[in-house]
Each structure stands twice: as C-alpha cells, then as structure tokens.
Image (cartoon, rainbow, N blue to C red):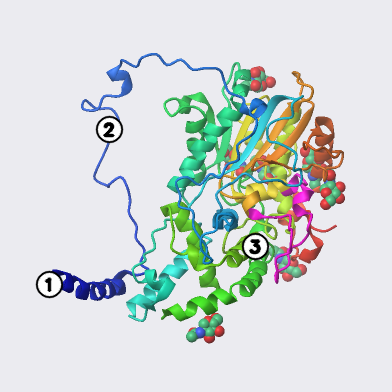
Amino acid sequence: MLAIVLLLALPFCTAESASSYAGSTVVNSYPPPGATNTAVDTYFPDASQVGYAGPSPTGAEPAAIVTAVPFSKVEGVFPLSRPNSADGADTTFNVMRHWGNFAPMYSVESFGLPDASPVIPERCGLNGVHLLMRHGARYPASDEPGPSQFASEIHAATSKKALSVTGDLKFLATWTYKLATTSLTPFGRESMFSNGVAFRYRYGELLNAFTDHLPVFRTTSIDRMVDAALTFAAGFFDVRTYETDYHQEIIIQENNFNNTLAPCEACPNANSEDIGNFGDTQSSKWANAYLQDARRRLQPMIQGVNLTISLLVGMQELCALETVALGYSKFCDLFTEEEWEGYEYYAVTNDLIVNKDFWYTCGPGNPTGAAQGLGYVQELVSRLTHTPINVWNSSTNGTLDSSNITFPLDQPIYVDFTHGVGIASVVTALNFTSLAATGPLPTDHIPPHRSYISSQIAPFSSQLVAQVLSCPASEEPTHIRFLLNDAVVPLTGIHGCTEDSNGLCALPSFISGMHERIGQIDFAHDCFANYTMPNPNNIIDGRYPS
Ligand SMILES: *[C@@H]1O[C@H](CO)[C@@H](O)[C@H](O)[C@H]1NC(C)=O
Ligand SMILES: *[C@@H]1O[C@H](CO)[C@@H](O)[C@H](O)[C@H]1NC(C)=O
Ligand SMILES: *[C@@H]1O[C@H](CO)[C@@H](O)[C@H](O)[C@H]1NC(C)=O
Ligand SMILES: *[C@@H]1O[C@H](CO)[C@@H](O)[C@H](O)[C@H]1NC(C)=O
Ligand SMILES: *[C@@H]1O[C@H](CO)[C@@H](O)[C@H](O)[C@H]1NC(C)=O
Ligand SMILES: *[C@@H]1O[C@H](CO)[C@@H](O)[C@H](O)[C@H]1NC(C)=O
Ligand SMILES: *[C@@H]1O[C@H](CO)[C@@H](O)[C@H](O)[C@H]1NC(C)=O
C-alpha cells in the first residue's frame, strides 16, 4: 500500500518542485554568519598553550629534479570524478584534457623534444629556478557568461511552466546552478597546495642558498591570486610557519595599473572591442561549425528552451566548471569525443566567452600578445643578469621593480603567480616559436597535428619553469632551459640558441637573444596606438606586423 502511494506521489512531486527551482541559482556560505571563532580561547587553547610538542627535526632539503629518475608524470585530478563522453567509457580518451584553459594541468608528453626529461641532464648542476604559475581551478569568471546564461534560460522556462525534458536531459528537471564566480574551487586549492609540495621536492635544496634574507614570491591582488599564492606557500613551506618563512608580495591588479603578472590591464588595446575581442569573433565561427550535430541530437530532448550554439557551448563549459567545483557534472557525457575535441579547439581560438587567453587574444595571433608578455621577460633578464631595470617601457612597475627589497635580483628561487593570459603572452614574448609552428588557426576545421593546444599551455595550475643550470656542475650558471607543464620546450626560435636534445641554451646566447627580442617589441605602439585589427593570417609572433 505504502509503496503504491510513493510510486504515485514521486513523479507528481518531482514535476511540482521542478517548476519552482530547476535552473535556479543556489548560493550557500560558510561559516554561518552568526558563528565566530576567537582563535585562542580557554576552551580551545592553541598548541603553544597546550605545550608537549615533542621534537620536530627536519631532514635535508630534497632536490628530486637533480636525482629522480624517472620523473613521475602528473595527472593531477584527485579527488574529481573522471567524466565520460557520449561515446561511453574510453580509458584512452580523457574528456578533461579537452577543456582548454579549464583543463586541470597534466604533464605534457612533448613539445618536440621527445628525449628530454624534466630531470636535469646528468652532467649539469642546478643553480636556480624561476617558476611562473597560473592559479588553480576557479569558478566561472565574470566575462564567461555561458554557464549562468544556460541556468537562467532553464529557470525562465521553468517559471513559465514551459520546460519539458526527456532522455539524457531529464536531469535538468531538478538541476540547479551552484557555481560562484572567479574564486578558487576546493580542487583549485588542493592543486596549489600539492604543487607547492611538489616544488619543494624538486627544488627545495636551493633554499640552502638563502643566507641572510627570505625569498620574495609575487602574486596579484585579486582574491583567487592571493589564495593561490598562500595555498602554494603552505604546501611549499609548512602550514604552521609559512607566513613567516617568506615574503608575499601582492601587486595591484586593476585597469591601468602596471603589473607584469596581470599584463592585460596595462595594455588598453588588449581590452578593445576590435583587437582584444578578436578571438571571440573567430571562435563563434568555429562553434557554429562543430556543434550542429549536438544541437540536432539534444534539441528533441528539451522543450521550452532553444538550444542555440552559445547555450551548447555553455553546457560544455558547465561540464568543466561543475566538475572542478563540485567533483562531477552531468553535462559531460552529453557530448561526443569529437565534440570535446571541437570544444578544446574553441577554447584556443576564443577569448570573450571562455577567457581572454589564447592564440587570437594574447597569444601569437594578436598584435598585443608579445607586448603583454614583455614585462615579465624584462624582469627575467634582469634577474638572470643581476642588473636592475631602469627603463619603464612595458607593464613593469618602476616603483616595485627598482627596489632590491620588492624586486631582489639574487634569489636562487623565484615564484610568481599569474593568469592564463600571463602564461600565454609570456611564451609569446619569449619567442617559443615551436608552439606557433603550425601557424594561424582556421575557423572551419581543426588542423591536424597543430602545435598550439591550450590545455597544454594555460590549463589551471599551468607551470612555466626556467631551470638555470651549470654544465658541467659549478657555482657559475652556464645554461638555461624551459619546462612548460613538465615538457622541455625547444629554444631554437630564439636567435643564438642552437638545437639541443635537452632544450639547453647557453646563458649568454639566451640573454642576448632576449635583448634582441625586447628591442623588437614596441609596447607603446602595440598596446596604445590607434590601429585596427590587422589580418590575423599575417601574425604569428604576437606583434603588429611591421
Ligand atoms: C606600482 O606599484 C605601487 C605599489 O603597489 C602602486 O602604489 C602604484 O600605483 C603602482 N603604479 C602603477 C603605475 O601601477
Ligand atoms: C532557435 O535559434 C535559432 C538560432 O538563433 C533560430 O534559427 C531558430 O529559429 C530558433 N528556434 C526557435 C524555435 O525559436
Ligand atoms: C607604467 O607603464 C607605462 C607604460 O610602459 C610607463 O610609461 C610608466 O612609467 C609605468 N609606471 C610605473 C610606475 O612604472
Ligand atoms: C639593497 O641595496 C642596498 C644599496 O645598494 C644594499 O645596501 C642592500 O644590502 C641591498 N639589500 C638587499 C636585500 O639586497
Ligand atoms: C623570434 O622569432 C621570429 C620568427 O617567428 C624570428 O624572425 C625572430 O628573429 C625571433 N627573434 C629573436 C630575438 O630570436
Ligand atoms: C624598452 O627598453 C629596453 C631596455 O630595457 C630597450 O632595449 C628597448 O629598445 C625599449 N623599447 C622601446 C620600444 O623603446
Ligand atoms: C582612431 O582612428 C580612427 C580612424 O583613423 C578615428 O576615427 C578615431 O577617432 C581614432 N580614435 C582615437 C581615440 O583617437
């Protein structure tokens, strides 16, 4: 009897509640507003009051990057569920690797030097390291309206009692929108912490060379960037002491402020409709090409909402962003492997809907791409040569960078946090031409074997590492090489650097190549001059064509 009542009641109940909340936005906040925690009180004395700490000796600093063989490749998705595509479970096709700049960082197989290991070459010694790292996974940014637009369409149809869903889209009857904006997700924090731990294992030994002052690490002022930096430091040092183990420099990120870690804000043309948003124009063309099948397949399963191409893109974004925020998403297996490949390509060509990150916006295909990365390259050269910067003709901040307190030049370890834009523009300014080798990106098909893949360049927690080495090992550095997400990058596009199977370039050649490159980039023109978007087929080095 009871069972029959339940069976009758359930569909009715589901339909009723669906009309009131499907698609609605759910916001929770923790801690509860009324609850306070007075860090130290008589009920909960802290460790120093309790005492009895016991001994706490530490061992020698690790240097796995010098000794570890083989280097273990990172998948880096714990504790997320691995999604399937509409084609079903396939252990070789990983949907997450097709999320473009929303992909969790993974170790890239190769950028063209298949024999190079991230472990330093045997005859070399490690003298220094420069890390430029993107923050970990975040909620949607304010310029990524896709997910929330999809939610409001569902909600509007529900309010009008017009929503009807069947088949694979049935879950939408009770689905609600649970994503906040722009801050780090718990997985993003986990990734920053564990990458801090990993960096200590690989490069910790270099801490021994800090003798009279503490390291300065830099980040930008916005919430997730500060969170990312502190969480990394808690993993790299120790959660109990990290706040006093180093100096955290926080550089203002805001329009018209100079900041080499948020260079878009210092480059007005990068924000203009015509030039900065060019990637959006390109990617819309591509979305219209790759999502037609999905639309034909999914539209019959939903009434009350017209699944436009931009809503379908929003659903793919929801798969990625719900997974990194909530641990799983029901949107992932709505799309086929081919459509996930389409999405990955969309993210490369895109700027506005996904992010201002890639080829046509701050990468090799935009006339401001190199100018945006220039400031960091000038800082890198300054650090490598121990020579202060004295010309302020990029996004560098002269107030901060002319002081040896806020911009020290003698550190064996440099750690800077940035955005996807930062990594994408810096590799353009560094003239990593192998990434641009296959040229401008067509908008009607995916070119086979393309060299520019955004989940390999600027995924969440993306890492560009410069290893400063001496070969043979000595006190004086002789060489440099770069790892992008654990794969060694060929430096043969840089004037003076010769072919090397380990990606090594002699330090003096690299520095003179960079001086030449710095001289080739005209920040004032590319970022400030009044020009219209040049033909994108003529740009592959991130500069306004001369
Ligand atoms: C440079 O940084 C300092 C210190 O944060 C800040 O006060 C100043 O406004 C910045 N200048 C520019 C042009 O961004
Ligand atoms: C759905 O949107 C497409 C593209 O905007 C349009 O061509 C089509 O007429 C729309 N269909 C309905 C039923 O509104
Ligand atoms: C900020 O950048 C502009 C453009 O390169 C430069 O003219 C200005 O001097 C810089 N300001 C500071 C404080 O460095
Ligand atoms: C900074 O420069 C001053 C003057 O050149 C020097 O006395 C001081 O030791 C330097 N401080 C650091 C931290 O390098
Ligand atoms: C950068 O790469 C371009 C090829 O895209 C090359 O013409 C130029 O000489 C390179 N610049 C430097 C300084 O290596
Ligand atoms: C910017 O300054 C550097 C010196 O730091 C110089 O080499 C370069 O030519 C300058 N760029 C322009 C466009 O003046
Ligand atoms: C930029 O140039 C265009 C065409 O030459 C002109 O119409 C426009 O007023 C200029 N804008 C500014 C801000 O100078």
Is disc 2 placed on a helix, strand or loop? Answer: loop
Observer-side mark, 3 or 2, equals: 3
Q: Earlier in the sequence, mark 3 or mark 2?
A: 2
Residue 434 drawn in magenta: yes
Q: Is mark 2 within 8 Å of ligand 1?
A: no
Observer-side mark, 1 or 2, equals: 1
Q: Earlier in the sequence, mark 1 or mark 2?
A: 1
Q: Earlier in the sequence, mark 3 or mark 1?
A: 1
The three-letter amino acid code for the residue at tag 3 is Tyr
* Residue numbers of the magenta segment: 428-454
> Is the residue marked by circle 2 packed among few (<14), some (14-19), or many (20+) residues within 10 Å?
few
Q: Nearer the viewer, residue 14 or 47?
A: 14
Residue that numbered label 3 is attached to: 345
Residue 380 drawn in magenta: no
In the displayed structure image, the side of residue 229 where residue 380 appears, left or right: right
The answer to whether residue 308 is seen in the rendering is: no
User: Compared with residue 121, is residue 31 higher up or lower down, i.e. above or below?
Assistant: below
Q: Position of residue 388 (x, y in %)?
A: 72, 30
CB-based contact (under 8 Å), mark 3 and mark 2: no
- Which quarter of the rendered picture does the C terminus lie within? bottom right
Residue that numbered label 2 is attached to: 38
Q: CA distance from mark 3 to mark 2?
A: 50 Å
Residue that numbered label 1 is attached to: 1
